[in-house]
Amino acid sequence: MSTGVLRDFAQPIYRTVNFVSSSDGAKLAYDQLTLDKPGGQIISEALVIAGADGRPEKLIPWQWGLSNIVGWLNNDQLIINIAAKDPDENRSAKPATLVSLDTKTGQQRTLRPNFPNIDLDYPTADWNGWGETVYDPNLQRVIYSANDFSYGRARFVLWNLQTQTTLANLPTRDVYWVQPAWSPDGKLFAVQTNPDKGNDWWSFELYGGGRDATQFQQWTHLTEYYSKVMIQSFTWSPDSRHIAFWFVPNPQGELTIEQGQMQLGILDVTTGEVAITCIPGDDAFSSSSPDLAPPLWSPDSQQLLVEDRFTNNAGQILLVDLSQHIAEKVADNMGPAVWLTGSSSK
C-alpha cells in the first residue's frame, strides 16, 4: 500500500486459492495445490499459514479432503468446512460440519450442527462456507437457523453451548444468504435480515445483541427513510465498534433479479448512528448471487477497501479513510480479499 508494488502469488506448479486473514492482520491462511506440471493435475494439497509479509511460515498437509477454509475464528484458530466428507452434507441435504484448528498447537475440535430444530429444508443454508452455524471466537455461543411449527417459519437462534439452552430468537423471512457474524472481541453479534413487515420482502435491517442477549435488537432503521432496502453484506471493524455494509435503497425489479445502486453504510454500534456515504458499489446487483466482496477493514479500523463496480466488466478498488473523510483509487479491476499489516511470529 505504501509503494504500490504488486506481488503475484502465482507460480507455475502451484495454484493458490481461498485466502483468509486473521483480524489483527498478522496471519494469512490459504489453500495451496501442487501440480505435476504447469497446468497439469493436482498431486498434493496443503494448508499454508503465512506471515504478514505473505511468506509461508507453516505448511499443514490437507487431511480433510476437498474441504474449504472458512475463516479465522480468532487470531490463532481457523474454521474449516468438512461437508465434503458426508455425501448428504456435500449436496446440502444436511447442515455442514465444521472443524476448528489451532494453528499453533495443531489441536482440532469437530463442531457438529446438532442443535434443536436446526433448519433441514433443502438446500440447507451455507453462509460463506459456515454452513448454517456461526460460532463466537471462544466457541461458547453459536447462531444457527431453525424452522419449526411453533414459529411457522425460519428464525435465527442464539444458543449457549455451555448450558445447552436457547438465549434468543429472531423470526425472519429468509435465512439462505443472510449470514450472522460475531464481533472480533466476541461480545456482540449481528445479522442482516428481513423480519415480517407486511408483505414486503425488501425490508432489511441490521439486528444484533450481546452474547447473553435475550432478544435481538434492531440496530438500523433504514426502512423509515426508504420504501425498500436490501442489505447485501457487512463486516465488523477489528475494534468491534463499527459495521460497514453494502445496501441498496429502493431496489427495482423482481426478487433475485433486482437492480439498484449499492451504497456503503457504516454503523456505529456504540451510538446507533449510521453514516450513509457517497461511495458506490454495484449498479446491477442480485440477492441470489452477490458479486461484490464485503467491505474490507484495515486492522487498525481506520480505513476500508471497497470495490466500485461501475460496469459489468470494469471496476476499481477505493481506499476509504474514515478519519480524513476521503476516498482514493488504489487499483483497477481488482477486488479486496485480505488486509495484512505489521509483523508476525511463528
Image (tube, rainbow, N blue to C red):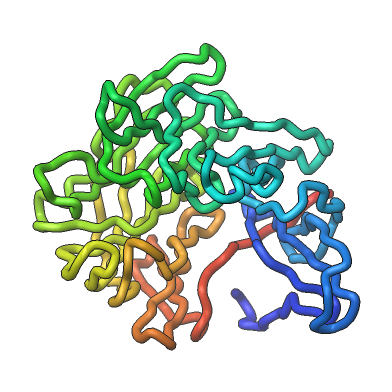
Quick check: 114 above or below 310? Answer: above
Q: What residue sits 72% from the left and 55% below the top?
A: 66
Direction from residue 251 to residue 137 in the image, left or right: right
Residue 287 quadrant: bottom left
Quick check: 83 above or below 114? Answer: below
Q: In which quarter of the image is the N terminus?
A: bottom right
Quick check: 313 above or below 205? Answer: below
- Marks counted in the figure total 0
Residue 154 in picture, x, y percent from top left:
32, 36
Q: What residue sits 66% from the left and 52% below the top?
A: 69
Direction from residue 312 to residue 142 in the image, left or right: right
Quick check: 96 above or below 26? Answer: above
Residue 135 quadrant: top right
Residue 332 in picture, x, y percent from top left:
49, 86
Direction from residue 315 to residue 90 in the image, left or right: right
Q: What residue sits 36% from the left and 42% below the top?
A: 191
Q: What residue sits 49% from the left and 44% below the top?
A: 239
Residue 33 in picture, x, y percent from top left:
80, 67
> In the image as oriented, which residue stretches furthest toward the top?
163
Residue 101 in picture, x, y percent from top left:
74, 39
Identify which residue, 137 or 325, lies in the foreground. Answer: 137
